[in-house]
Each structure stands twice: as C-alpha cells, then as structure tokens.
Amino acid sequence: MSRQRALLIDITRCVGCGACTEACREQNGLPEVEDTDLSANSFTVVQEKGDYYVRKLCRHCVEPTCVSVCPVGAFTKTPDGPVTYDATKCIGCRYCMMACPFEVPRYEWDRKAPLVTKCIMCHERVKEGGQTACAEACPAEATTFGYRDELIEEAHRRIRENPDDYYDHIYGEHEVGGTNVLFLSPVKFEDLGFRTDLGERPLPELTWEILKKIPTLVTTGGVALAGIWWLVNRRTTVDQLRHESGERHPHQPNTTDIERGRDNG
Amino acid sequence: MAEKIKKLTFWNVMFGLIVIVGVIATIRRFALGLGATTGLSDAVPWGMWIGFDVMSGVALAAGGFTISALVYIFNLKEFKPIVRPAILTAFLGYILVAVGLLFDLGRPWFIWHPIIFHNPHSVMLEVAWCVMLYLTVLALEFFPAFLERYRLTKAVKVIKIATPVLVIAGVLLSTLHQSSLGSLFLIVPHKLHPLWYSTRLPWLFYTSAIAIGFGMVIVESYLSSRAFGKSLERHIVIDLSRAMLVSLVFLAVLRVQDLIARDALHYMFQGTFEAQMFWIENALLIIIPVTLVAIRRIRHHPMGPYFAGLSAVMGLVMNRMNVAVTGMSAHTGYYWPSWEEIMITVFLVTLGFAAFAWAIRNLPVFGHTPWREVVYVNPLQKTPASEQSPALHPANAWLR
C-alpha cells in the first residue's frame, strides 16, 4: 500500500485571501458563487471565525464514515489518501450526508438527477504525482500537501519550535481514527467551531459491531425457529393420532374424548 | 340507509380529492426535483418520507411476521383468522415503503443498484436486501388468497407445503431489518439526542415493532368492521391487546434500563423540546396503551383495545420521527415538511387503504363471504361476532 497523501492546514498562517477556493472552482469547473458554507457549488470555503480564517472541506478520513454507510459503495478510500465518489453508482439515499461526522457531503437539491458533491482531494492530480489545486494556489503556505506521516511530523515540529503560537494539538491526527486533512490552530479548536467530542474511535466500528453478528443470527435463529416449529407441530400431530386411536393423553387423564375433540377442532 | 350512502359519498369525494392532489404533488416532485418540492436541505437530508413513510411504515407492517410466527411456528391456532389480514397489511405496507422510497431517493431509477453493487459494511444495504426479500416472501404468503379465489386448489397445496419455510424466512428477514432500521442511527452518536441515541437502538426498534404489529392488527380490525362490516371475534382482539401489553411493558423495561445504563435519565426532566417530544412519544406509545389494556373493563370494552392500539400506533410514528428527524434537529436545523411531502404521504396511505378495501371485497381475507353479501356488524353490539357471521364461503375452507 502506498503511503497516504494529506493536507496540512495551518490556521496561524492563513490570511483569508480565498485563493484556495478560486483554484478549487477552476479545477472542478464550479460556478462563481459567494458561499459562506459548503454547497453543491463549493467544495471548500474559507470561514471567518473571530480573528482567524478556517478552511472547510472534506477531511478524507482514514476510516471514512461515508465509505462505510453507502449501500452501493459509491465512495472509495483510495490507497493514496483521497476519498472519491462514483456518481454512476449513487442512488441518492443521502445516508452519507446523515452519517458524516464533519457534515461535509452536499446535495444538488435543484437538479432533477441530483448527485452528492464533496472535495475529492484532486484525486486525478494526486494520482499523477501532483498536489491539490488548493495547496498549489496558497500564497501563504497555509495549506500544504504531502505524505500524511511527514505532515504530522512537520506539524509537531512547528508546535515544538513555536509553542507560544500554537495550541498543542493536531486536529485530525487521531479524531475518528485520524483524517487526511490536518489542522494546526493558534487557539483551542472548539473556539473555531471544531467538534471536539468526536472521540478517536472510527465511527464505522459502531455499525460493524451489529452487522458482523448477522450470519450467526441467521443460522442460529433459523435452526431455533425450525426446531420450535418441528417440536410444537409434532406434539400436535401425536396428540391427534392418540386421539384417533382412542388412547388417552398422558397429561390429560381426566379429559373426556368429547372435550378433547372440541379442543383439537 | 340514506345516511350510509351520504357517508360513502363523502369518503368517495375525499378519496377523489386526495388522488387529484397526490397526482399533482407527484408530478411536481419529479418535474421540479427534491429542492423545490420538499423541506429537505443539506442540513436535514432526511425528512418525513424517511421518518414516516419508510421507518414507521416498516414497523407498522410488523404484524405480518409476528402473527404468522404465532400461528405457524408456535401453533397458536386461535390467531389463524388474522393471519391473512395481517399478511395483507404487511404486504401493502411494504409496497408503500418501496413506493415512498421512489419519491425520496434522489435517483429512484437506480433503486435496483443494491442488487448489483454491494457494500457489506453498510446497514442500508442490509435493509435494502431484507426488504426486497421479505416483499417476495409476503407476496408468496398472500398468493394463496388469489389462488383460492380462482379455486386453484392444487397450487394452494404446493404453497402450503412451503409455508413453514416462508414463515421462518419472514421472521428472520423481519428480525434483521426491523432492528437494522435502528442500527442505521448507530453511526450518528454526535448528532442524535441522548434520549434516543443508544447502542441498544436495534433492540428498541425490534421490540417496538413487535408491539406495534399487534396494535396495528387491532386498529385494522376495528376500521374494517366500521367500513366493511368485517371484524374479528372479540376474544381474538382481547388476546391481541394482551400480547401488545406484554411487548409494550417489555419495551418500557428495556427503555428505562437503557436510559439508566447510559446515565441519560436526567434528560427527560430538562424541559427541552426533545424532552417534551420524548414524553409525548412515550405517553402515546407506552403509558396510555398499557394503562388502557391493563384495566379489565376497558380491555373487554369493544372500543378499549382499539383506542389502546391507536395510541400506540401514533406513539410509534412519533418515535420513528423523533429518531430520524426531531432528535437531530437541535444539531442539524429547522425542518418542516412541504405540502408536497405531506400530500404524497396522504396519497400513498390512501392508496394503501383502497387496495386493502379492494382485497377485502374480492379475496378471501377475513374468512367471510365476499363483502357485498355480508350484513353490517356493529362492533358495539354485545353479541359475539361469531354468532352473527354467516357460514363460511367454500373458498374459505382453509380457516377450518
């Protein structure tokens, strides 16, 4: 497996110029719109949070929730990092939108044959050894592209060398099992609107805990039900045969044949 | 008699209006797309069609598998007269679920994709497969009604041999997808309010589905007695209400235990919007029906089990809506269904009722003669229904 690529977004360096969003529009052929949040027309936005600028985009989780929930497997975690989307498979159930812990996938609500939209980390460019359009366009090196392990090392180095400038945490190193978009911040992440209650456990494990029990449930359940059916109905048949041959039922010594006949009827 | 015709006319007019508005809403939905005709958005991607049409629809159809299990696996012959109506309801219910999905899916023409594209890690795939297979099982289980109608006794015999296999398959498939509709929400621990989010959601969904399966059969029996003069014998309805009581108490225990285990009991007393919804839901789903059925005089009153069942049905619908929509609203944002969403739902339910009515009139469902020949049986009358019902139609010999 090839090493995973990732993006490191250093909020202390971002000047909010919006070059990344422009480059993203050009790369993905998106219309010029002024969105303040992700939409079907904006795969990334720069949001103003107090004194800082925070980019929003797909986090390309190491164990992505969208990949796990999609019934038809329209999402793929590629070995080199990006989480891609196969529009030809999508049926439009929107479970990915419900499930994503970062609330990234958007829907083309205005189209008659709508699709899910999200950043795919310029997968074509990455595959050919290039970097993402946003990282290439960033004039302040606030968004940098590279190998995930190297970027984590680099992030730790920045925190170590300038401890006063950084909050001591790399968002995305461990959140929901780790993401391929990493953030460095000058302040606490919750102050910038990041969810800090997500935990380190990949969310797909929650549903897999149940799903992996299905084969056992089907086999043991099937055998148990068939067994109950056989036992219960066999007893009825035996009772009936006994009744027909005039024999007394061992558990009903005082019941007359007439009464029993009514019960069985 | 004149009054009855007027009443019938009123319902016919209502039916016509609902169909016209429903067809207009349907055309708008597919001509203009989801954005223009629903209250859905990026923040609230699932709404009424999922919460009511799909999630509640599947639960309300649970009577099909519970009753057939009681009769064919546990050999409780007493319930045999309700196997057919219960399976018919389930069959129609699941068809409506599938049709409702066609409205909700963004690309409904690809609804068959789960057959060829598989992601075994997806709960949604499991639900899709179970619903497809169970719909097939239900069709086979209800098929004898058509065969008997046309006196194809040999074919009936063939299906009868397969009955135990079909019933066991039905129980397994229902167990899987009824619980899996709850498992769908295991993946949103940070979005769903702690009054509903639990790792025991599959158990809670399964138990409530079983309870509501009984409740729905009671409600249905009452409605068909009013509409077609076909009701179940009183002692069956009373026993059904007892079965509902037991499963609801089981649900209540499971629920309280779950809240205590998760240390979430205090959320009930916070006076938040979610807490209010939780109380209304549980009053309707558990407290009211359990109280009504537990009191002997009410349980034996002709209307008692009906009101208990109706309350539980409404509570169940609230529960599913709360899990799928309301319980997440604090996190996601405001949602209110559009008139198209509401009217398409009303339209589908009305079509379901119409199909049920047609089947009751034309097929051996309730084990009486076809509708037009039967006298109207007032359920409030004290005489047991068994004494009033006419002799069995030859096509209904299977009841013996």
Image (cartoon, coloured by chain):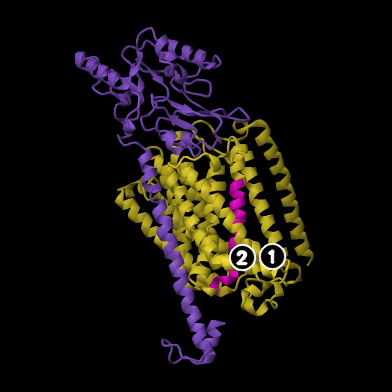
Chain colours: A purple, B yellow
SS class, disc 2: helix
State which quadrant residue B83 falls in. Answer: bottom right
Residue B119 in view: yes
| Residue drawn 51% across the image and 51% down it | B130
State which quadrant residue B331 falls in. Answer: top left
| Residue drawn 42% across the image and 33% down it | A100
SS class, disc 1: helix
Q: Residue under label 1, please give it.
A: B147
Image mark 2: chain: B
Instruction: Name the residue nearer the viewer: A197 or B290.
Output: A197
In the image, residue B199 lies at what x, y percent? Answer: 36, 47
Above/below status of A142 relative to B232: above
Q: Label for residue A257?
A: none
Instruction: Name the residue nearer the viewer: A107 or A210.
Output: A210
Task: Classify residue B10 as left or right of residue A51.
Answer: right
Image mark 1: chain: B
Please say if the residues under marks 2 and 1 sit with CB atoms less than 8 Å apart: yes
In the image, residue B52 lies at what x, y percent? Answer: 55, 47
Looking at numbered disc 1 in the image, what kind of residue is underneath it? Leu
In the image, residue B81 lies at what x, y percent? Answer: 60, 71
Q: What span is colored magenta in the figure?
A: B78-98
Q: Residue under label 2, please give it.
A: B159
Mark 2 or mark 1: whose residue is earlier in sequence: 1
- Which quarter of the rendered picture does the C terminus of chain A lie within? bottom right
In the image, residue B353 lies at what x, y percent? Answer: 66, 56
Q: Residue furthest top?
A: A139
**Label 2: how many residues lie within 10 Å, few (<14), some (14-19) or many (20+)?**
some
Let me know if residue A195 is in the magenta part: no
